[in-house]
Structures are given as C-alpha cells and as structure tokens.
Image: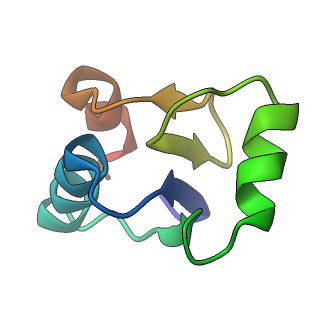
Amino acid sequence: MNNVIVYSKNNCMQCRMTKRYLKEHNVQFEERNINQQPQYLDYLKQQGYQSVPVVMPANSDPIVGFRPDSLKGLVG
C-alpha cells in the first residue's frame, strides 16, 4: 500500500517502533516530523490528535500510537 503518512517527533520510542515495523514489512511511508516541521503539529491538533505517532493510510482510518495489530493491515 502506498500513500502512508507517519507523523512523528524526535526521541519518541513509539514513533521509532512504528517506523521500524513499517520498514521491516516493506511498507513505504512518508515521515512528517513535528520537531523539524512544526506546521504539522498545528495540523494534528486541528484534527484532534494529542500524541504521536499518527499513521494515516490513504484508504483507511488513522492509527494512533504503536499498534502492531492495526499496522498489520497495511502490510501488502
């Protein structure tokens, strides 16, 4: 599956684990780091999110936090 966006921040263990899981399962994603690109923090707040990681697949509901059970659905 393409068009997966991962919102993350520096020094976030759940973010690291989520990105590692996606990489290990060959799921391509675009990372948007809220420390390096603060405009994405405002976007997440407007959407009602209060924590990262937030994984936004193009064709399904967002996944908040490190949720291997939910991430499994993104694996080809």
Apparent side of residue 61 relative to residue 31 in the rendered image (left or right): right
Q: Residue at x 26, y 48 (%)?
A: 18
Q: Residue at x 74, y 59 (%)?
A: 40
Measuring from the top left, give residue 62's x and y in whole percent.
59, 31
Apparent side of residue 39 relative to residue 70 in the rendered image (left or right): right
Position above or below: 70 against 17: above
Q: Residue at x 44, y 43 (%)?
A: 53
Position above or below: 49 against 56: above
Residue closest to the eye, 38 or 14: 38
Q: Residue at x 51, y 44 (%)?
A: 55
Measuring from the top left, give residue 17's x and y in whole percent.
17, 49
The residue most toward the right is 46
Measuring from the top left, give residue 42's x and y in whole percent.
82, 49
Residue closest to the eye, 67 or 43: 43
Position above or below: 57 against 4: above
The residue most toward the left is 24
